[in-house]
Amino acid sequence: MNIEVRHLTKTFGSYEAVSNVSFSINRGKLIGLLGPSGGGKSTLLRMLAGLETPDSGDIFINGQRVNDVAPQNRGIGFVFQNYALFKHMTVFDNIAFGLTIGRSDKAQIKSRVNELLDLTGLRGFEKRYPHQLSGGQRQRVAFARALAPRPELLLLDEPFAAIDAKVRKELRTWLKQLISTIGITSIFVTHDQDEAVEVADEMLIVQQGRLEQQGSPIDIYTNPQTAFVAGFIGHSTLVEQPALLRGFNLVQVPEGSRAIVRPEFVEVGYEREIAFPSAAETGNVRHVFFRGAHLELEVQVGGNRLLAHRSLDQEPLQPGDEVSVLIHRLYVVSEHSAVMVENPLKIDPLPVHI
Ligand code: ADP
Ligand code: MG
């Protein structure tokens, strides 16, 4: 085990920014720390780095409790949201910064910086100043600088937040490869689920200071354990009274619980296209959005507006069309649980009476 956090709590005034968070991370893993803005991600990361003092709880790195270890002695590299490069220093000097503090000799520093210039594809840029670089290049300098002293753990706080979408996508692929080449344990903070899913071996989902779930992207996607995770991951619609939906009235839905329906759970079409028409609701198409590879439909079913996908190969549907809507499954959620329920009528369709 490489990193372990036990019962970490941090309050600002009366506000609990991080609330009793515990987790452990194995060596060499790239962890996506994902959650909405204000959820406590940066505070958690800053406590690991020693830039913020926890009110209570312990942090272990390789079995050593580091709560009282100074930031520069924790073996942690940190890449911030904004580049935070030294403006008056060249690329070379920026990368060398952590090494000069460590008092390595000149030849050693040069050789290590050259290694990092090669690793990050910045060879040839060493004499430039930050303002002579693109956003993506500056962030690569920031990685190189963080990696220079050979940290045990790399912390990245929304490193691509200030970079435009196309370059950001390239950079995260690059980063994932770089991190797996070096094999360094890393925590990558983002509020963008696509970014987290694409980059992470494992994800930590935080909200309002609490750790909601830890698991692989697939695990979290298919087995959300809390209402928050079920609603946050994927494109979801909240249904207030799931027992009013056909099929699900046969399910024991606890009083007051709600449901989360994802577009991929919903089949929309003409009655003859639907596999289990007796299990389907009647709905009305409200909007049709072209999403490149498929269409996204918004359909009104009773009091609910659901999202569904439809293939471009199928007969087109228009707003106003009456359609059959088969809800294959949904998550029944209460505050601290999410349970997937299959539509019972779909599994065992009732005989159709003529
Ligand atoms: P995230 O990185 O997930 O967006 P943060 O960890 O930055 O969230 O913040 C969590 C909460 O703590 C927010 O409500 C934020 O306003 C508050 N907070 C963070 N740092 C401080 C601080 N130094 N003083 C007071 N409140 C803070
Ligand atoms: Mg933050």
Image (cartoon, grey):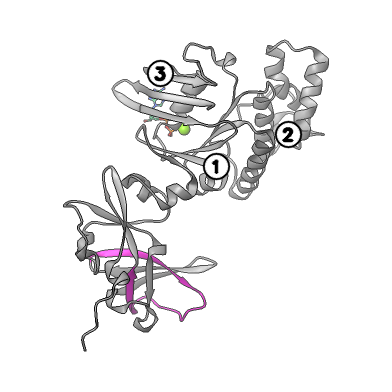
Few, some or many residues within 10 Å of mark 2 (<14, 14–19, 20+)? few
In terms of image quadrants, where is residue 268?
bottom left
**Which range of residues does the magenta coloring cover?**
303-327
Residue occupying the point 51% across, 26% down: 3
Identify the residue at the far bottom of this view: 354
Q: Secondary structure at mark 3?
A: loop
Disc 1 target residue = 201
Say which of 255 and 124 sits in front.
255
Disc 3 target residue = 54
Residue 150 lies in the magenta-colored region: no
In terms of image quadrants, where is residue 248?
bottom left
Q: Amino acid at mark 2?
A: Gln
- The mark that comes first in sequence, 3 or 2, is 3
Q: Nearer the viewer, mark 3 or mark 2?
A: 3
Callout 2–callout 1 Cβ contact below 8 Å: no
Q: Secondary structure at mark 2?
A: helix
Label 2 within 8 A of ligand 2 by Cβ: no
Q: Nearer the viewer, mark 2 or mark 1?
A: 1
Residue 135 visible from this viewpoint: no
- The mark that comes first in sequence, 3 or 1, is 3
Quadrant observed for ligand 1 in the rendered image: top left
Disc 2 target residue = 132
Callout 3–callout 1 Cβ contact below 8 Å: no
Label 3 within 8 A of ligand 1 by Cβ: no
- The mark that comes first in sequence, 2 or 1, is 2
Residue 76 visible from this viewpoint: yes
Q: Amino acid at mark 3?
A: Pro
Q: Amino acid at mark 1?
A: Asp
Identify the residue at the far front of this view: 348
Q: Secondary structure at mark 1?
A: loop
Few, some or many residues within 10 Å of mark 1 (<14, 14–19, 20+)? some
Measured along the vertical axis of the image, is residue 72 above or below residue 112? above
